[in-house]
Image (cartoon, rainbow, N blue to C red):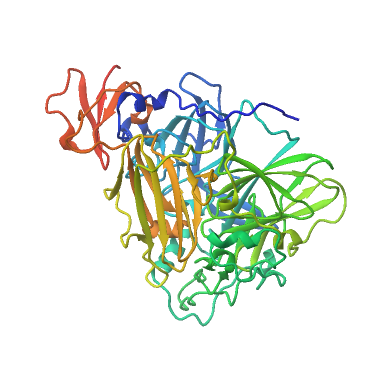
Amino acid sequence: MRIHHPSRRSVLGASLAVAGTGLLAACSSSPDGHHHSGSDSGSGSDSGSAAGRKIRLTAARASLDLGGGRTVSSWAYGDRLPGKEIRATAGETLAVTVANHLPQSTSLHWHGIALPNAMDGVPGLTQRAVKPGADFTYRFAVPDPGTYWFHPHSGVQQDRGLYAPLIVDDPREPLAYDKEWVVILDDWVDGVGGSTPDAVLAELRGGMGPSPEKDGPDHSSGSGSGHDGHDMGDMGGMDGMDGMEGMGGRAGTATGASPGPSPSASHRTPSRMLMGATSPLLGGDAGDVAYPYYLVNGRTAQDPSVFTAEPGDRIRLRIINAGGDTAFRIALGGHRLTVTHTDGYPVRHTTTDALLLGMGERYDVLVTAGDGAFPLTALAEGKGAAALAVLRTSGGAAPTASVRPKELSGKLVTADRLEAAESVALAHRTPDRTVRLRLTGGMAAYDWGFDGKPYAPDRRHPVRKGERVRLVFSNPTGMWHPLHLHGHTFALTTRPGGARKDTAIVLPKGTLSVDFDADNPGLWMIHCHNVYHAEAGMMTVLGSGLTRPGHGPRVRSTGTVHGCGGRGTEACAVRASDVPRTLPPGHRVRETNTLGPCLNYASH
């Protein structure tokens, strides 16, 4: 059992030295970051070095076993789902090389990590896409302990098998526990009946139409028309969730849920458009996509993954929702959950029976294992289906795929009811700037965006380095949206000392207000973590730390910045016009893209 003293101080590492030297815009990636390689390795690491511990990931076509005789063709990092876990210690530097063996360009985003902007993995904003046959190395320090994950930020690739956990250990871990169980939830469509995420997006972009019939969920994998009579009742918006605690309602059902328009006879793939799936807990519409499978750690409910322990063991569960379009309500039969962290950051310990996770959200919980075999059930909220894993501490019959533990209808603590641990609570401060964003769009035209406009990388919301920023999201749409901020964590303002997060749900007709400190310079994405909403246009950019035209020096030299290729000392300019006409000897313009030119102060 590990017992340590609390610690939560961020270690930003040498690659963030730019913040102390006046560099206020993030570097673009260097051409030197790409090189061709014939390596066909999966995922691995070698001994550490001054440049960081080396890890190699290969993104390639793969045949994935979902259990129960179900094998699908997809894209993955190696031949396993989820991909191989990366584990590091807070403050450690990683050098992760992605080899792209896919037929499309790709990228890698480190979800929840406060890293240098050039390593954030957003093509066209922080780097150039990694083309087929090319490599790219992401080099960064992992500053904060916690539960994180990584996935592409390219098209709808995340809704394939391209994801894996990133666990950052605290060298002075304050929690005491015997075992750790990383639990990754997912909704799955790729390779089933000829479906792909790209085809799903194309269908959704076609808009809603008559829907007399639909290809529904695969009932053999535990899907059904309801949740065995469970229904939460009228919950209203998330701001009115006080009634959730201790209530004895029933788990939410999909009222009249049915897939969208039937494909024509010439179509060889089933329709995946979901209509009529509702959840009071989510404020109405539950989702857009009718997934045939729901998974825990890459396995269907008919052939679930099994975690073994001893009766009485204290187990830390790290739960990640890697889904594309599904919120999961999760509970462990016969156990209560003690919530210790959300999105990697500690909270005041709170007990609950169940949790709700939007896409991209993470929770850490502690449980004391009972004696027997227990279902870890994750309801696909409002969609009439569930995923399953098993905790086994002794013999006995395994839970069935259709089991719905009573804890699913017990106390459910939502993120707005959690308080940050004192060590990480955002200090009280009046916001220096308020950025208001209106979520817009709908299913009819599938025109999701912010303020009525689709994503454009040059449309930015200015933010200055050092400001306390308040983000106010209003959602007049009929759909819930899990919003994710890159490069920072924010504090929920629903109560003093609100939980620190990087992803939070905004309910239909509701408002979400969060505060964060603009202490990580760069151009940072805010987007809906419904992968189909984001790709349809619900993304925008915060220009954290950008200088105003005509103010201050146009280009400043810095210390070593690995983000521009990892060589020499470099600086960036926001606009091409900011580059001095005469550069110092040995200096040159390295690259120009949406960020503007990156200057190389060559020392090599």
Looking at the image, which is closer to me, 553 or 307?
Answer: 553
Locate the N terminus and report the quarter of the image it occupies.
Answer: top right
Residue 531 x %, y %: 46, 56
Residue 374 x %, y %: 79, 53
Q: Is residue 212 left or right of residue 169?
A: left
Please say if 446 is above or below 552: below
Q: How many labels does the image show?
A: 0
Give the image quarter of residue 34. Answer: top left
Residue 561 x %, y %: 35, 25
Q: Is residue 205 left or right of residue 590?
A: right
Residue 104 seen in this snapshot: no
Locate the C terminus and report the quarter of the image it occupies.
Answer: top left
Residue 504 x %, y %: 50, 52
Looking at the image, which is closer to me, 543 or 326?
Answer: 543
Q: Is residue 233 left or right of residue 592?
A: right
Q: Which residue lies furthest to the left in this view?
A: 581
Give the image quarter of residue 32. Answer: top left
Looking at the image, which is closer to me, 322 or 519?
Answer: 519
Residue 422 seen in this snapshot: yes
Which residue is located at x 49 percent, y 80 percent?
Answer: 211
Q: In this view, does 382 lie to the left or right of 179?
A: left
Q: Which residue lies furthest to the right in this view?
A: 395
